[in-house]
Image (cartoon, rainbow, N blue to C red):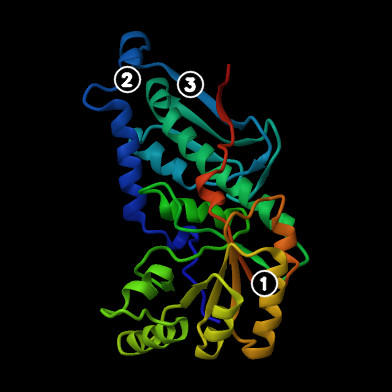
Amino acid sequence: MQDFTQHHWQALDKMDVESLLAAALFEDTEMHGDLTSLALVPHNAHGSATIVARTAGIVAGMPLVPLIVSRVDPELAWELALEDGAELACGSVVGSLRGPADSLLIAERPILNFLVRLSGIATLTQQYVDAVQGTKASIYDTRKTTPGWRRLEKYAVTCGGGKNHRTGLFDAILIKDNHLALGRQASKPFSPAEAVIQAKEFLHHRFDNQPVVEIEVDTLEQLREVLPAAPDIVLLDNMSPAQITEAVGLRNSLNPAVQLEASGGITLATVRAVAETGVERISVGALTHSAVSLDFGLDWKE
């Protein structure tokens, strides 16, 4: 079936990336540059350094490094050692820099800030992906992202083996309780099936390649009612593994083409049990809102 947009590096909006890089460098240097280096480091000093992982994990964000380097100083040289998605051990070298020492000092923190955040997301994602190996479930992210970083953070999820849920409100329909309640200017709200039918009719007149139509349900009764309307996906919100197992059986008997997504409070400790129910999708907000940054450092060479 048609899926949400997947954020691989080649498909990223480079304007978003460039604006983030510009902001990262400006907040460090503003109008005066690096005052410490200006005061203490000779302008003709040169050096070289490696970027090293301090902890094990999965690397993400390496294509950003040459973009930062070129913005700081074209005389800086960058040599890549590991590609995004590579497994890191403590002490793994991901790349090296050489050139004017003052420029290298300016580039250091922005490079590390992007790598630690994105690699932390990729690492946590891989842990969830590994936890559901052998089941039919795929791990998806959510829109619970850092403002301005969404596409990069979703890209990091793919580096860890996860998949991307909708990028924004603009590229898929996801019907929730509030939409059912607000969708009519009358005392009776939409039923789930009525909402799906109207959403599909709306898209039919506006898109040749129709976006995904997904609806959230809280009960098995709602699921039973909506399946004949044939949404692409039904999101099972905050259901227990036992309830999800019942939902899978109900879906299999009434409309096997509809995919099921489990969501709500799913952790590394519980994700395996959820995956074993037979759902196709598990969405986890923690991939982006609770990932712990992976530690990197810049080690100067003699």
> In the image, is residue 191 above or below residue 46?
below
Q: Is residue 83 visible?
A: no
Q: Is residue 20 left or right of residue 276?
A: left
Q: Position of residue 108 (x, y in %)?
A: 45, 28
Q: Position of residue 1 (x, y in %)?
A: 56, 82
Residue at 52% x, 84% y: name it: 226
Q: How packed is label 1: few (under 14 Cα within 10 Å), some, or many (20 or more)?
A: many
Which of labels 1 and 3 is toward the front?
1
Residue furthest toward the front?
187
Q: Is residue 212 left or right of residue 121?
A: left
> Observer-nearest residue: 73 or 87?
87
Q: Position of residue 14 (x, y in %)?
A: 36, 55
Mark number, residue 47: 3
Which of labels 1 and 2 is toward the front?
1
Q: Residues under labels 1 and 3: Cα distance?
A: 53 Å
At mark 3, the secondary structure is strand
Q: Residues under labels 1 and 2: Cα distance?
A: 53 Å
- Indicate the quadrant where residue 88 lies: top right
Residue furthest toward the left?
31
Q: Is residue 186 left or right of residue 2?
A: left
At mark 1, the secondary structure is loop
| Residue that label 1 marks | 279
At mark 2, the secondary structure is loop
Residue at 37% x, 39% y: name it: 70
Residue at 55% x, 54% y: name it: 157
Mark number, residue 34: 2
Residue at 52% x, 87% y: name it: 230
Check disc 2 and give the amino acid type. Asp
